[in-house]
Amino acid sequence: MATIYDFTVLDTKKQPVSLAEYKGKVLLVVNTATGCGFTPQYEGLEALYKQHKDAGLVILDFPCNQFAGQAPGSEQEIVTFCQLKYNVSFPQFAKINVNGDDADPLYKWLKDQKHGLFGRAIKWNFTKFLIDREGKVIQRYAPTTKPEVIEKDILKLL
């Protein structure tokens, strides 16, 4: 698979969504959790999205319960939490696994494109991947990297 556009994922209602719908956009793909120390990053992600969505930025949120069970709710519970607490308006998807044999194919591909500091595996919630308008992975960011820090790299692609 050559680009992110070759993948289909499930939305929060478990309906298939082709990522080709986002062709020509700058994407920030994030594995999230609602009960994590990094959960307040939703606020920064939403601020980035609101500020730059008209220029072509889309944030894609993939909840993951693989790290200390920090995303235990159903998809609808996660969406409700994110909307009530952080006013999230960017696309959210069904929960996935990002590591292991049953890792989602999208995340297998993302990890192959950009390794982290200590290898391929996703180390924790809120690991971020920046994708250019051609669907190629440009950068991978650690969970500790706040969304505001990524803005300069996003602006280069917009």
Image (cartoon, rainbow, N blue to C red):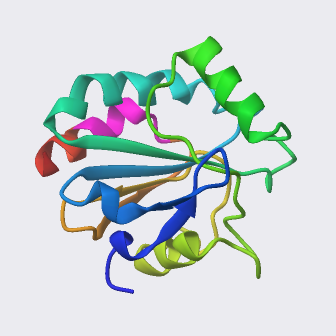
- The verdict on residue 10 being magenta is no
**Res 80 → quadrant:** top right
Q: Residue at x 64, y 44 (%)?
A: 12
> Would residue 119 be visible to someone looking at this image?
no
Q: Position of residue 129 (x, y in %)?
A: 42, 57
Q: Residue at x 25, y 23 (%)?
A: 51
In the depicted structure, whether residue 26 falls above or below residue 4:
above
Q: Position of residue 20 (x, y in %)?
A: 33, 65
SS majority, magenta:
helix
- The verdict on residue 148 being magenta is yes
Q: Quadrant of the C terminus?
A: top left
Q: Residue at x 55, y 41 (%)?
A: 92
Residue stretch rendered in magenta on the structure: 145-151
Observer-nearest of 9 and 106: 9
**Res 55 → quadrant:** top left
Report whether 77 appears left or right of 43.
right
Report whether 144 appears left or right of 18.
right
Observer-nearest of 25 and 136: 25
Q: Position of residue 53 (x, y in %)?
A: 25, 33
In the depicted structure, whether residue 69 falls above or below residue 5:
above
Q: Quadrant of the N terminus?
A: bottom left
In the depicted structure, whether residue 109 falls above or below residue 31:
below
